Image (cartoon, grey):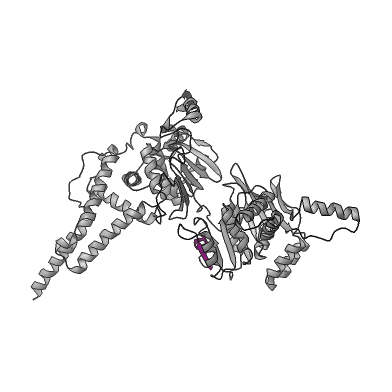
Amino acid sequence: MLLNFLIILLLLTGITGFAALSLIPNKKEEKLTNSYSIEEIIKTVDRVFAEILDKDYRRLNLNQKETMKRENIKKLIKKCLKKSAEGDEEAKEYIKDYIKEILLHKIMLNEENIEEVIPFHCTDKLTGQDKFEILLHLYYKDYKKDGLQKFLEKNRLETAYTITEAELEKAYFKEITHLSFEDKVEVIVQRVYQQYRGFGIIDRLREMKIDGISAGVSAGNLLGSRSGMTAGFLEEEIFAKRIGNKKEYHTGIKEEESLLDVWIFYKGRTIRLDFLRFPSERELMRVCKSIYRHNNPGFLSETRGYLVNDMKDGSRVVVFRPPISVSWAFFVRKHDNIITMDISRVIYDEGADQVIQLLKWMIKGCLSIAITGEMGSGKTTLLKLLIQFIEEHYPIRVYEQVYELNLNKAYPNRNIFSLRDSPEVSGQDILNVMKKTDGTVLILGEVASHETANYLIEISQISKMTLCSHHAETTEDLISYFKISQLREGGFHKEDLAEYQAANAINIDIHMENKNGHRYISRITEIIPYYKKDLPGGLVEATQEYYKRRTSPVTFETRDILSFIDGKYIIQQGFSVKSQGHILYNLPDSERQEFSEYMKGGGKL
């Protein structure tokens, strides 16, 4: 009996081992390709995955439990292949591990033949992309997503407009002295993955803590569909080709040096990577077609022309294609560069303490706030940081076009719920249902349409406090935009009434500026709705005031509470009596005395 039991156990063990090895590259199998080019390796990798997914484990005569186990592993591989192509980092690492096994045990990479894939030993044969990816791998190994930041800072490249190939080579020769076999394998695995299932040359770069990344935005026309004045201009455009440290100027369309360029947005600066570009229009198109696919937002078609979506890591991605745009292009905007919720890391100029104190009282006092400024000025970052001053027992509800703020991750212990519209559910429907979610503070993210602006005016009447961001340059422009939104979407017919409604919905305008990467609050402006007073007693004065109100109605006034002057923050005026009363009313008893002392000090620390 014991002998029979041992035989059965060995048979079961052997069958289980065989099934497991069928999913993992066989170390004893001969290599599947005689070529070590990246393209041939990708073909081999694709063939191996296809064999795994096509295998029918029911034919192995395993018991039901073991068959289901292997089928589940196959399903996991299939799922990870799909998710990795959408930017899922966990799925990506899973697929990269498989690729590594294929490289080592089916393609048989070793110390000798690995140089045939990428000539690591011969620097002169390495391309700019090779050198950059080697450097990025080493920095990622040491600093993870902070790797690019460390690289730029160490080589003093964070303020450059263009990082040239000469500057890259200087950094490479300074830092690369020896690469281990393991490092070489990891570089090749990443290269294979990014061309096979990833986002091409920006795959690893996109993961770094930067503000954003884009491509397809330089001069030129990849599709060759030039016509009219545009064609004449492009044909006569002057392009510069870098040769060493010199520039040779010539005319003509150079597609491979224009729309295929890669740009990064880093700490408010746009930086062109001169050494990194997509190898072809086809590759740029492939990345454009996959980078927006998270959560199946629909298809980018000639009719639709563009798509806005969020990625798995919370980044916002906008993709364009002809004919709505001159070429295929994508714009990824990231918001994971906030390392800590310490607001002093963002507001740090002289007088920053009084600014932070001012912001704290505005939020605690439930003033409705619009954060304005140009793109890249830090609006979303500041909005995200201000949430820390909201009373913890206030439920927060968020409406966004795409999920950019990711407040649940930033404040995991808070009562926060985010919503957005869809082709089937309108923003108005979302607003209506949001009213039934017991929200106290409502956040609209970026107000980028008149429809959304109208939503804000509406919800400001039912919430304790509203927060939003907008691209207005002045407070007058901000109120004017919301006034027009009320006239277009809100059913208003009188301009003065629509303007008054807008001024009554927004108490504070915090304006952000970005000067060469230096982000700061340029001013904090209070918006005070105008309450009509009685006409003057004298006939002449009363007549003048009457016609003034009829011809040029004043619905609000503004006062700058704080300004940024000569590199430092300066308190200009305190809160109005109306705002002081509003803040005091919403503060808990324990903080009212502290705020009163703050105001007695002139609004200063």
Is 189 or 59 nearer to us in this picture?
59
- Identity of the residue drawn at 42% across and 54% down: 297
Q: Position of residue 73 (x, y in %)?
A: 26, 61
Residue 418 among magenta residues = yes
Q: Where is 418 relative to 297, above or below?
A: below
Q: Position of residue 56 (x, y in %)?
A: 19, 59
Residue 478 shows up from this direction: yes
Q: Quadrant of the C terminus?
A: bottom right
Q: Position of residue 351 (x, y in %)?
A: 69, 52
Query: Residue 74 is drawn in which quadrant?
Result: bottom left
Query: Residue 443 is drawn in which quadrant?
Result: bottom right
Residue 345 shows up from this direction: no
- Identity of the residue drawn at 87% across and 58% down: 536
Start and end of the magenta stretch?
405-423
Q: Where is 175 relative to 61, above or below?
A: above
Q: How many marks?
A: 0
Is 554 or 106 nearer to us in this picture?
554
- Identity of the residue drawn at 57% across and 59% down: 444
Q: Where is 174 relative to 429, above or below?
A: above
Is 316 or 499 nearer to us in this picture?
499
360 relative to 437 in the view: left or right: right
Q: Position of residue 569 (x, y in %)?
A: 70, 51
